[in-house]
Image (cartoon, rainbow, N blue to C red):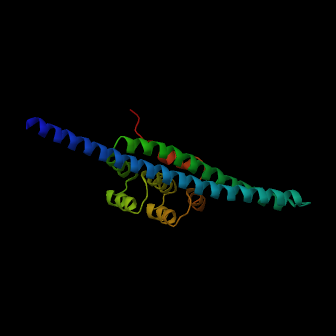
Amino acid sequence: MKQVRQWKWIMVAGCAFALGYAVAQSSAERAVSQAQSDLDANAAALNKQWAAINEELKRVVAGTNIELNQAEQLQKDIESKATAAVAGLETSLVRAMVAILEKTVHANGIEGEAYGRLSEFFGAEPSYLAALKGKGVTIGSMVTGLGIAKAKNLKPETVFEAYLAKKSWADIATAHKLQPTELMKALNGLVPRD
């Protein structure tokens, strides 16, 4: 009888482990899927930005005798578009790196610690993070959005409102005039170094 009870506990423990693993796997799979969707949306936004730069350059090449004041304005326009595109590309790179960290979080079952770190680092209320999670925002998207908010001194609600309205991170970065390296600087120190 004692041996039967031991086997029951072993079975219960095994099922609990398997269930926990399945939940971690499905969370990781959702995180990967969301990161891939985010990266696809960023690619589409970046393609539009680069196409706009290309059209501007073609317009200039086709033109003749550009006045000096037109050349200066043209240079400013192209620099502005190029800066936005580079910041959008940086946002994509950050989102990809964060997705790798997010997979590690899910694989190790440390989501609670991750949310705690986000709350601590960004000063975000745990209830706000829980509300975002309830709306389907993954840890990786939270890092990206909170990073943009921190870099541009915005309320996170402003950033996530746009994201939840299906704006790409590149479009959000452009709308808030995120400069190259601002996002990386805003995230510096998020992952503690031992």
Which residue is drawn at the image coordinates 35% and 50% (left, top)? Answer: 115
Q: Position of residue 132 (x, y in %)?
A: 40, 60
Identity of the residue furthest to the right in this view? 65
Q: Position of residue 146 (x, y in %)?
A: 45, 55
Q: Position of residue 90 (x, y in %)?
A: 59, 48
Residue 11 visible here? yes
- When the figure is inspected, residue 10 is found, relative to residue 179, above or below; the finding is above
Quarter the N terminus occupies: top left
Residue 27 placement, left or right of 151: left
Identity of the residue furthest to the top in this view? 194
Quarter the C terminus occupies: top left
The quadrant where residue 12 appears: top left
**Residue 94 or residue 31, whichever sits in front:** 31
Which residue is drawn at the image coordinates 51% and 51% (left, top)? Answer: 35
Residue 150 placement, left or right of 15: right
Q: Position of residue 97 (x, y in %)?
A: 51, 43
Which residue is drawn at the image coordinates 36% and 40% (left, top)? Answer: 108
Which residue is drawn at the image coordinates 39% and 50% (left, top)? Answer: 27
**Residue 40 or residue 193, whichever sits in front:** 40
